[in-house]
Amino acid sequence: MSIESRRSARYTDFIPVSVYVYQEGRDDSLAGPFSGTIVDICNYGACLLMSNVTIDSFHVYHSTRKNKSAYLHIKIESHPRLEGTHIDARPVWLNTFQREDFRERMIGIEFLAVALQHQEINTLIDNL
């Protein structure tokens, strides 16, 4: 059995979010909103649970990974203390699981360095 070593503690919660894809230097979104839920979070990243990851031919994970200047803009939708908070991140891994007709994707995201310098992430975690 291996013991996982992480940079910071993970916290489990279910936080509804909207996910948009932006590109550095542009004011309008490339895609979105996608609906999702943060299922765990730490100071450096989070795990998103999403049932739909495509709009037209845009895939929230693959298309964003191909475009090095694209990033995810995650907006917290309905959390009593965090509504309206937003965090920018990049996707780092994707896992799909399916049971019969039920299919979900888990996307691991890493917060952008700029986001790590802001108080939003610490506030978000402190308020869980």
Image (cartoon, grey):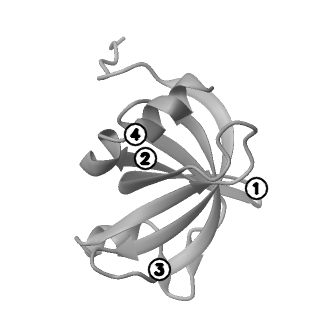
| Horizontal arrangement in the rendering, residue 67 relative to residue 46 (left or right) | left
Query: Badges 3 and 2: C-beta atoms under 8 Å apart?
Result: no
3D distance between C-alphas at marks 4 and 1: 30 Å
Outermost residue, front direction? 119
The residue lying at 27 percent from left, 79 percent from top is: 25
From the top left corner, tell me how far across and down residue 8 is, in percent: 35, 21
Q: Residues within 10 Å of mark 4 (few under 14, many from 20)?
A: many
Q: CA distance from mark 4 to mark 2?
A: 7 Å
Three-letter residue code for mark 4: Gly
* Quarter of the image that includes the C terminus: top right
Lateral position of residue 2 relative to residue 59, left or right: left
- Do the residues bearing badges 4 and 2 touch, measured as CB atoms within 8 Å? yes
First in sequence: mark 3 vs mark 1: 3
Give the mark nearer the N terminus: 4 vs 1: 4
Q: Is residue 114 above or below residue 101?
A: above
Q: Report helix, strand or loop for mark 3.
A: loop
On the image, the x and y values in percent for residue 126 come to 54, 23
The residue at which mark 3 appears reads as: 29
SS at mark 4 in the image: strand
In the rendering, which numbered label is found on residue 45?
4
Tell me the amino acid under the disc marked 1: Glu
Residue in the image at 34% along x and 18% along y: 4
Which residue in the protein does label 2 denote? 108
- Amino acid type shown at disc 3: Ser
Q: Amino acid at mark 2?
A: Gly
Q: Earlier in the sequence, mark 3 or mark 2?
A: 3
Q: How far is the residue under mark 3 from the one under mark 4?
A: 21 Å
> Would you say the residues marked 3 and 1 are in contact, meaning their CB atoms lie under 8 Å apart?
no
The first of marks 3 and 4 along the sequence is 3
**Which mark, by number, is residue 64?**
none
